[in-house]
Amino acid sequence: LLAVLDAGIDQLPAEVAAGHRTGDEIGEVHRAVVARSDSAGCSVGFVDGCRDRNIGFQVVARRKTAVSAGSPGFVGDSFYWFPTGCLALLSAW
């Protein structure tokens, strides 16, 4: 999923893509970018990857017992659902 995100960033105009590659500083960002995903993005790896790229995110996943049982500690942990840096980034625009 992160490879698809990176390919999408590569297609953006330079002024929009600035600051949205792995390791870029938040000060390099000129325009906010938000990634939306279905339950495929409901993973620590995807969320952390968005944060590493200074990208806001929205992950929509239906909660089912089988899914929750397969990811203990993640679905119910509010830390993963609060995009700390992304809220500050989006509020600047």
Image (tube, grey):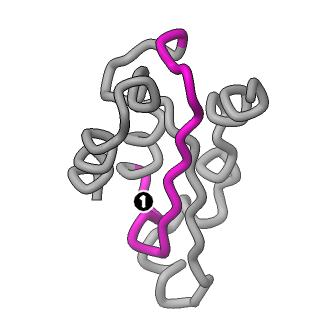
Q: Is residue 70 left or right of residue 23?
A: right
**Residue shown at 52% from the left, 61% from the top:** 36
Q: Is residue 7 left or right of residue 12?
A: left
**Residue shown at 49% from the left, 74% from the top:** 38
Reply above or below: 17 against 67.
Answer: above
User: Splitting the image into 4 quarters, where does residue 87 fall?
Assistant: top right
Where disc 1 sits, the SS reads loop
Per the rendered image, the range of residues in magenta is 27-44
Q: How many marks?
A: 1
User: Splitting the image into 4 quarters, where does residue 30 fall?
Assistant: top right
Reply above or below: 11 against 40.
Answer: above
- Residue 45 part of the magenta-drawn span: no
The image quadrant where one finds the C terminus is top right
User: Splitting the image into 4 quarters, where does residue 1 fall?
Assistant: bottom left
- Residue pointed to by mark 1: 43
Q: Amino acid at mark 1?
A: Ser
Residue 71 position in % (x across, y down):
45, 69
**Residue shown at 69% from the left, 45% from the top:** 82
How crowded pointer 1 is (Cα within 10 Å; few <14, some 14-19, many 20+) is rated as: some
Residue 17 position in % (x across, y down):
39, 31
Residue 89 position in % (x across, y down):
66, 27
**Residue shown at 72% from the left, 27% from the top:** 88
Reply above or below: 28 against 30.
Answer: above
- Residue 39 part of the magenta-drawn span: yes
